[in-house]
């Protein structure tokens, strides 16, 4: 979907659009509608009987004295509870009104909330554009409406911050859509090689560089975790390196982003059940998709920061030569791992990538992965789990990633990494084993990965929020692109710690 996004200061009555969306807060609806009636006509005043500005209120009216053909009133709820994510959800409800009337041109009024105008502008554009997303690649029939082709943000004056917010919101939303498309693509079109080539194409389009390792190079590097998972596949693995290295970078040593790229996961010989499990496993590369989307966004935003992306990719299938429970793998780092469950494969491919990340002498490494079903049980489908290792700055790292989550709407919550959790992955025959038992599965997976890092590190388990089976305000069911906005916000702050 291609949507033109712009900003205007024209009087409301002069906006020539199919739908004009006006957010209104609860408790101020009467006064706000009376004020609007002086510009748009008495139909707005009459609407006060049916619209109070509650968070679930939305009303379409037809103003007499406006070039806008329809007016959509959208409630924001109590003003004391409004934050930037409420603003995103308000814009998303506005998009539902636009979809109901098949509006081609839409304007949204920037509400005066006492919040940072730049952040509100970004949130409005993100909320509307992300709500408009539909994955239609395989549809042969439809209603012909693919969303508005023009979105205009109405502001009181040409405030530079609002303009920056609009442009950033557009770029970030499009990057999230890239990640969603990658996740939603059919598995038969998403082999490790095809996935790597699609990343390469995106790099050429948006300005980051890519390098794709084939199986021979992976073997030469000794990435035996990735190779073990790949043994049951008829398709070779890939290891893709993405780089954004601007001349004005504020960091000498890079931030490294690592994304789990299991393009389809059957569980291997530890076969998954189909219903509500294997049928969603085209999304097992959602961590990698988030890294790709984030790289697109930071390149297009020209963030002054050195960033490297690492994506180990393969499918996990029960082929004739598939790895088996009981195998012992000597990993890239030299550490040995006893395999007790072939469905705990994501941590094996991540471990090799995390080990390789040491070659960059990174300032920080962040990995993102759909790693454990236990994460969904613990935190549900709207919040990801986040962990870090016990190195200087651990608390500050967790504070920073959680703060970025609140600002971006990609919420994360910290999990403990106490030493005793590591005992669950002790092996009788190898250094460690790849599963830790029923208890604290998300944490023991994090403790497994901790064995392969000796630098500041953050682990994000996004199994729940990366793929959903029912629509949420600006997240259509399917791949959500979770993690893109989280990383962009985190990296913007890292590049400029003075920014609030």
Image: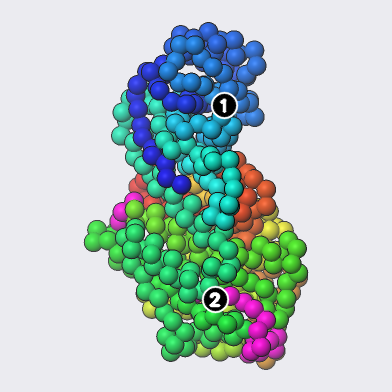
Query: Which of the marked residues, 2 or 1, is nearer the chain's N terminus?
Result: 1
x and y percentages locating residue 465 in the rendered image: 61, 54
Residue 74 image label:
1
What is the secondary structure assignment of the residue under circle 1?
strand
Residue 314 image label:
2
Q: Is residue 323 left or right of residue 358?
A: right
x and y percentages locating residue 259 in the rendered image: 50, 67
Q: How many marks?
A: 2
Vertical arrangement, residue 249 with respect to residue 83, above or below: below
Residue at 60% from the left image edge and 23% from the top image edge: 59
Q: Is residue 204 magenta?
A: no
Residue in the foreground of this view, choosing between 132 and 495: 132
Report the mark closest to the observer, 2 or 1: 2
Residue in the foreground of this view, choosing between 65 and 163: 65
Q: Is residue 149 visible?
A: yes
What is the secondary structure assignment of the residue under circle 2?
strand
Q: Is residue 326 magenta?
A: yes
Q: Which residues are magenta?
A: 301-328
x and y percentages locating residue 409 in the rendered image: 53, 46
Mark 1 nearby-residue class (10 Å; few <14, some 14–19, many ≥20)? many
Residue in the foreground of this view, choosing between 369 and 336: 369
Q: Is residue 368 visible?
A: no
């Amino acid at each position: 979907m291609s949507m033109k996004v712009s900003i205007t200061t024209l009087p409301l009555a002069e906006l020539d659009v199919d739908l004009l969306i006006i957010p209104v807060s609860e408790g101020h609806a009467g006064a706000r509608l009376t004020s609007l009636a002086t510009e748009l006509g008495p139909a707005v005043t009459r609407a006060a009987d049916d619209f109070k500005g509650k968070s679930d209120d939305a009303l379409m009216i037809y103003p007499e004295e406006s070039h806008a053909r329809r007016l959509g009133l959208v409630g924001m709820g109590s003003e004391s509870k409004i934050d930037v994510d409420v603003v995103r959800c308000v814009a998303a409800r506005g998009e539902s009104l636009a979809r109901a009337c098949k509006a081609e041109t839409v304007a949204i009024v920037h509400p005066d909330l006492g919040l940072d105008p730049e952040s509100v502008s970004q949130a409005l554009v993100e909320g509307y554009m992300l709500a408009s997303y539909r994955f239609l690649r395989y549809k042969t029939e439809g209603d012909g409406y693919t969303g508005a082709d023009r979105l205009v943000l109405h502001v009181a004056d040409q405030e530079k911050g609002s303009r920056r917010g609009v442009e950033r919101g557009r770029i970030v939303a499009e990057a999230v859509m890239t990640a969603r498309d990658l996740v939603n693509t059919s598995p038969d079109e998403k082999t490790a090689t095809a996935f790597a080539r699609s990343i390469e194409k995106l790099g050429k389009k948006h300005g980051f560089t890519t390098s794709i390792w084939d199986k021979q190079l992976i073997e030469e590097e000794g990435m035996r975790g990735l190779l073990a998972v790949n043994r049951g596949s008829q398709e070779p693995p890939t290891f893709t390196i993405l780089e954004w290295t601007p001349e004005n970078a504020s960091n000498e040593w890079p931030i490294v982003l690592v994304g789990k790229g299991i393009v389809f996961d059957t569980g291997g010989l530890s076969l998954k059940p189909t219903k509500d499990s294997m049928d969603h496993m085209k999304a097992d590369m959602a961590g990698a998709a988030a890294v790709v989307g984030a790289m697109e966004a930071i390149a297009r935003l020209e963030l002054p920061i050195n960033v490297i992306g690492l994506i180990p990719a393969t499918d996990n299938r029960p082929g004739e030569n598939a790895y088996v429970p009981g195998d012992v793998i000597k990993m890239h780092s030299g550490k040995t791992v006893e395999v007790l469950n072939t469905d705990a494969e994501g941590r094996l491919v991540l471990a090799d990538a995390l080990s390789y990340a040491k070659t960059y002498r990174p300032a920080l490494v962040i990995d993102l992965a759909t790693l454990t079903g236990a994460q969904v049980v613990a935190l549900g489908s709207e919040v990801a789990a986040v962990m870090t290792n016990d190195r200087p700055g651990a608390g500050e790292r967790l504070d920073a990633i959680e703060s970025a989550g609140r600002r971006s709407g990609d919420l994360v919550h910290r999990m403990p990494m106490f030493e005793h959790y590591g005992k669950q992955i002790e092996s009788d025959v190898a250094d460690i084993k790849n599963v830790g038992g029923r208890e604290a599965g998300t944490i023991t997976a994090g403790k497994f990965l901790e064995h392969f890092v000796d630098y500041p590190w953050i682990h994000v388990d996004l199994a729940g929020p990366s793929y959903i089976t029912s629509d949420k305000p600006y997240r259509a069911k399917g791949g959500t692109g979770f993690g893109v906005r989280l990383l962009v916000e985190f990296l913007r702050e890292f590049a400029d710690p003075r920014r609030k």
